Image (spheres, rainbow, N blue to C red):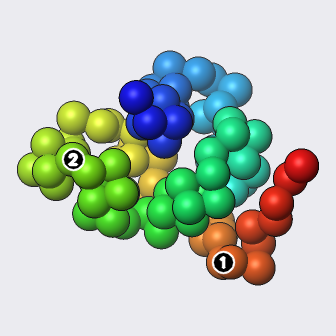
Amino acid sequence: MSRLLDFLNALDTNASLIQTHKSDPLKAARDFGLSDDEQLVMTTRDKQQIAAFLDIPFRDFDAIDSVETYFGPAVKKEATDADLEVVA
């Protein structure tokens, strides 16, 4: 299973991750261990792009509730390439 899909599933159950994601989605994604590409696709908040990245049909994407629940107006910042840093 992809790390991104693990992250989306964790957003349904992990209260600490949910809080971090609500206040700083990029930090939550980085701390979870998502790759730069995964972080970038998550910050787009575009369900079609995320589904394409995961290589799942968009029509099946509604089964992943966290994107709908946690990517609303409360998201404060979208990442840019400049925001992503390589952490060794």
Horizontal side of residue 55 vs 79, given as left or right: left
Residue type indicated by callout 1: Thr
Provide residue 27's location: percent of width, then percent of height: 75, 50
Q: Residue at x 40, y 29 (%)?
A: 1
- 37 or 67: which is nearer to us? 37
Q: Residue at x 75, y 40 (%)?
A: 31
Q: Secondary structure at mark 1?
A: loop
Horizontal side of residue 17 vs 65, given as left or right: right
Provide residue 38's location: percent of width, then percent of height: 54, 55
In space, the residues marked 1 and 2 are separated at their CA atoms by 24 Å
Q: Is 22 situated above or below 16? A: below
Residue type indicated by callout 2: Ile
Q: Residues within 10 Å of mark 2 (few under 14, many from 20)?
A: few
Horizontal side of residue 54 vs 39, given as left or right: left
Q: Residues within 10 Å of mark 1 (few under 14, many from 20)?
A: few
Q: Residue at x 39, y 47 (%)?
A: 67
Q: Which residue is mark 1?
A: 80
- 86 or 21: which is nearer to us? 86
Q: Which residue is mark 2?
A: 56
Q: Residue furthest right?
A: 88
Q: Is 68 situated above or below 72? A: above
Which disc is residue 17 wearing? none
- 32 or 15: which is nearer to us? 32
| The image quarter in which residue 78 lies | bottom right
Q: Residue furthest top?
A: 13
Provide residue 77's location: percent of width, then percent of height: 65, 69
Residue 43 in sight from this viewpoint: no
Mark 1 / mark 2, whichever is N-terminal: 2
Q: Residue at x 63, y 51 (%)?
A: 35
